[in-house]
Image (spheres, rainbow, N blue to C red):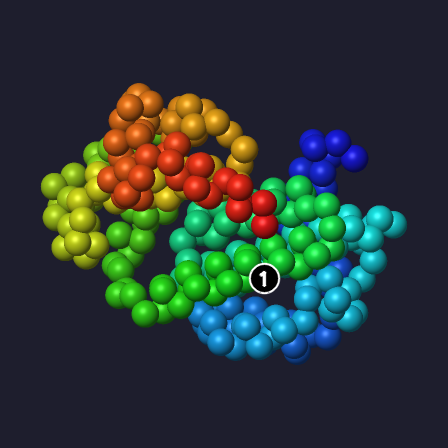
């Protein structure tokens, strides 16, 4: 199966409502609820058994490894849906799902799949824990967050966000600063840096490609912004993390 075919297959599984997931319902429901609640300790207990050793998973492919990849994809899709219901910004949830599915596609053994599954669950759960303990934002600011995620590949201005949300630029600017403690521009830069970091870890794109995809005005500006928020340049981050980013 070539890369495009795999991608289409994964998209089909993500969009399906009748997921073929034969494990007992109650334990699975408890698992997803724990992730949504940000219960880190509870999830760790439930993950004592490796994902690929779990009993009751249906056979989705004649190739055992491919079958587990499909189940991994189903889990990623379910996690994103539960976390969105729990308050995670939808673009962040889907972004994480896409990243982990791409990494699962690269796995060569069931052990790698199991290790990646634990990493994914911990990632979602930790983020949900942070959401639960952080302050609650107003509807307009949440809309603003989602606008930023929808347009990370563009030059994002507060006027465009204000027009989309239906507020004046000045009012949104004051409201954003009051609720988040940072300016709109600072938030955009922080989120672009976070996305760039994830792309370095998982996408396989070059640094120049990442800078272009995220609409940084120049490579030097990308380096400047990344270093401001990460403490190192993109190249230094890549050198330090890429060798360990296979799982």
Label 1 Cα crowd, 10 Å radius (few <14 / some 14-19 / many 20+): some
Q: Along the horizontal axis of the image, is 110 left or right of 169?
A: right
Q: Indicate whether 4 appears above or below 230.
A: above
Query: In the figure, residue 188 lies in which quadrant?
Result: top left
Report x, y in % for residue 150: 40, 39
Query: In the figure, residue 118 lies in which quadrant?
Result: bottom right
Q: Along the horizontal axis of the image, is 42 left or right of 104?
A: left
Observer-nearest residue: 189 or 19?
189
Report x, y in % for residue 3: 70, 33
Residue 192 appears in the figure: no
Q: Along the horizontal axis of the image, is 36 left or right of 72?
A: left
The image quadrant where one finds the N terminus is top right
Q: Mark 1: which secondary structure?
A: helix
Q: Indicate whether 122 appears above or below 7.
A: below
Report x, y in % for residue 82: 52, 63
Which residue is pictured at 68% across the width and 64% down the height? 51
Farthest top residue in view: 218
Q: Along the horizontal axis of the image, is 89 left or right of 2?
A: left
Which residue corresponds to mark 1? 118
Q: Indicate whether 152 appears above or below 134.
A: above
Which residue is pictured at 36% across the width and 64% down the height? 131
Q: How many marks?
A: 1
Observer-nearest residue: 146 or 122?
122
Residue 234 appears in the figure: yes
Farthest right residue in view: 62
Report x, y in % for residue 38: 44, 70
Observer-nearest residue: 3 or 77?
3
Which residue is pictured at 68% across the width and 46% down the height? 107
Which residue is pictured at 22% across the width and 42% down the height? 186
């Amino acid at each position: 199966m070539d890369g495009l075919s795999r991608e289409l297959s994964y998209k089909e599984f993500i969009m399906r409502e009748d997921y073929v997931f034969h494990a007992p319902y109650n334990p699975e429901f408890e698992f997803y609820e724990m992730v949504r609640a940000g219960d880190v300790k509870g999830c760790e207990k439930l993950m004592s058994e490796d994902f690929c050793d779990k009993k009751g998973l249906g056979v989705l492919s004649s190739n055992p490894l491919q079958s587990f990849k499909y189940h991994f994809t189903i889990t990623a899709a379910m996690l994103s849906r539960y976390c969105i219901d729990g308050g995670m910004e939808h673009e962040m949830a889907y972004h994480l799902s896409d990243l982990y599915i791409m990494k699962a596609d690269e796995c060569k053994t069931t052990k790698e799949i199991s290790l990646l599954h634990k990493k994914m669950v911990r990632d979602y759960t930790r983020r949900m824990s942070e959401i639960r303990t952080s302050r609650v934002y107003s509807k307009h600011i949440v809309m603003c967050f989602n606008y930023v995620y929808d347009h990370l590949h563009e030059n994002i201005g507060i006027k465009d966000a204000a027009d989309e949300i239906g507020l004046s630029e000045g009012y949104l600017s004051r409201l954003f600063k009051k609720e988040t403690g940072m300016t709109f521009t600072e938030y955009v830069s922080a989120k672009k840096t976070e996305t760039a970091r994830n792309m370095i870890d998982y996408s396989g794109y070059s640094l120049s490609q990442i800078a272009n995809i995220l609409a940084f005005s120049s490579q030097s500006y990308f380096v400047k912004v990344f270093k401001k928020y990460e403490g190192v340049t993109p190249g230094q981050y890549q050198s330090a993390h890429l060798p360990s980013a296979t799982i």
